Amino acid sequence: GAGVSQSPRYKVAKRGQDVALRCDPISGHVSLFWYQQALGQGPEFLTYFQNEAQLDKSGLPSDRFFAERPEGSVSTLKIQRTQQEDSAVYLCASSLESTRRKETQYFGPGTRLLVL
Amino acid sequence: AQSVSQHNHHVILSEAASLELGCNYSYGGTVNLFWYVQYPGQHLQLLLKYFSGDPLVKGIKGFEAEFIKSKFSFNLRKPSVQWSDTAEYFCAVTSGYSSASKIIFGSGTRLSIRP
């Protein structure tokens, strides 16, 4: 079946510009996660949704970062007034939510953001 | 706070050599352990996972990992590597019983295989 998809795959922004990154999770997946992967590093958690509810946003680095999932499926990560340190790959992952067993997170291809 | 350490930043091997990538985590409670792989130009894929039970876990493509609780380790092994195993490997951990836990990743180990 279709996996997690993300768009755009690449984004070049001028410093100060706002950007919006989109994630389409696997159909039926309740949980959705955003991660940031800097060059040469492992992914770092940004935020987590269960359906449309944002249950954890402890990883968002500043108030310039905002995420939403208004209908419990597609999610958008928005970065306002981008800065050079925002340059990274932004990964989205989704998983089923189950109280009966632990589920695996499935990752999308990521959006590579370059801020000039 | 939880953390994951991967001690080898870059490993270079010849084809048919045996592989062991080290991973240690710090967390005292119930943990779930993972190895993810990222082939060049591709997205993160799950190699194998440990939730409970047999501490020796077998994954795809001939990889296996052993959970040693007393050492807080989850090392990845493969008896004979192939050129196609060239990739970035990430050890990762989640805590507790919920499947909705954020993943804590190590910094990754780049594996290069000489043909």
Image (spheres, coloured by chain):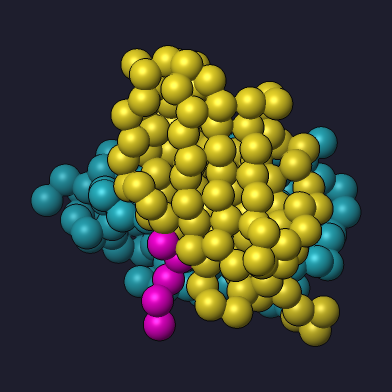
Chain colours: A yellow, B cyan
Residue B2, x across and y down, in percent: 77, 40
> Measured along the vertical axis of the image, is residue B11 above or below residue B100?
above
Residue B70, x across and y down, in percent: 79, 52
Tell me which residue sits at (76%, 52%) in the image: A54
> Measured along the vertical axis of the image, is residue A111 above or below residue A13?
below
Tell me which residue sits at (26%, 49%) in the image: B41
Residue A26, x across and y down, in percent: 51, 73
Q: Magenta part of the protein: which range?
A: A1-5
Q: Nearer the viewer, residue A54 or A70?
A: A70
Q: Nearer the viewer, residue B115 or A52?
A: A52
| Magenta stretch secondary structure, dominant | loop
Q: Nearer the viewer, residue B15 or A86?
A: A86
Residue B69, x across and y down, in percent: 76, 56
Tell me which residue sits at (46%, 34%) in the image: A19
Q: Residue furthest right?
A: B29
Tell me if I can see residue A59 in this picture: yes
Q: Quarter holding the N terminus of chain B?
A: top right
Identify the image quadrant of residue B96.
bottom right
> Measured along the vertical axis of the image, is residue B103 above or below residue A101?
above
Q: Residue furthest left?
A: B115
Identify the image quadrant of residue B24.
top right
Tell me if I can see residue B51 in this picture: no
Left or right of A32, for residue A39: left
Left or right of B114, for residue A18: right
Q: How many marks?
A: 0
Tell me which residue sits at (80%, 66%) in the image: B98
> Measured along the vertical axis of the image, is residue B3 above or below residue B28?
above
